[in-house]
Image: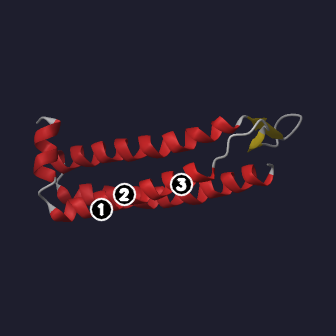
Amino acid sequence: MKLQLIAKHALKDRAFVIPLLGLLLASLVIVIVFATQIKPSQLNLPIRYTTFGVTHIYNDSWYYLLGFILFIVASFIIHSLIALKLFSQKGPVIARLFLTLSIMLVVIEYFFIISVLGIALLSQ
């Protein structure tokens, strides 16, 4: 089936739309919070810590943090498309379960991004 037809059929199911809106809301909140905290500067920010290598802490420019925003947006789009595919092939129950797990993944992403942002803001 076409994606438009699947989406039209899935959006009529209220039990499917509620987790989808929850995923959208969680993703938007993270993007807004993170985007408002990023401040352009000439300073290099600590972006990665590893025990391998000479310096252990690696620095990069501030726009490295924009990749996290793109990751959240891509995560929302891909998980929504997978949920639509599951809705058409496996049924609405599996699609709702997948969306619920996706919301949990976004919450984990939130905590990870807040910790990265905390490290980056401490160095400025």
Which three-letter amino acid code belongs to the residue tagged 3?
Answer: Glu
Label 1 or label 3, whichever comes before in sequence order: 1
Q: Is residue 97 visible in this depiction of the protein?
A: no
Question: Marks 1 and 2: in contact by CB < 8 Å?
Answer: yes
Residue 85, by quadrant, is top left
Q: Secondary structure at mark 3?
A: helix
Q: Can the viewer see residue 10?
A: yes
* Observer-nearest of 84 and 7: 7
Instruction: Identify the residue shown where x is 53% and y is 59%.
Output: 108
Q: Which residue is mark 3?
A: 109
For label 2, the residue is 23
Instruction: Examine the rendered structure and indicate whether residue 57 appears above or below residue 27.
Output: above
- Relative to 19, 63 lies left or right: right
Answer above or below: position of 118 versus 63: below
Q: CA distance from mark 2 to mark 1?
A: 6 Å
In this picture, residue 62 sits left or right of residue 29 = right
**Looking at the rendering, which quadrant does residue 48 occupy?**
top right
Q: Position of residue 54 (x, y in %)?
A: 89, 34
What's the amino acid at mark 2? Leu
Residue 19's label in the rendered image is: 1
**Which residue: 42% across, 40% down?**
74
Residue 69, given in percent of the width and then of the height, sits at 52, 44
Ranked by sequence position, the earlier of labels 3 and 2 is 2
> CA separation, marks 1 and 3?
17 Å
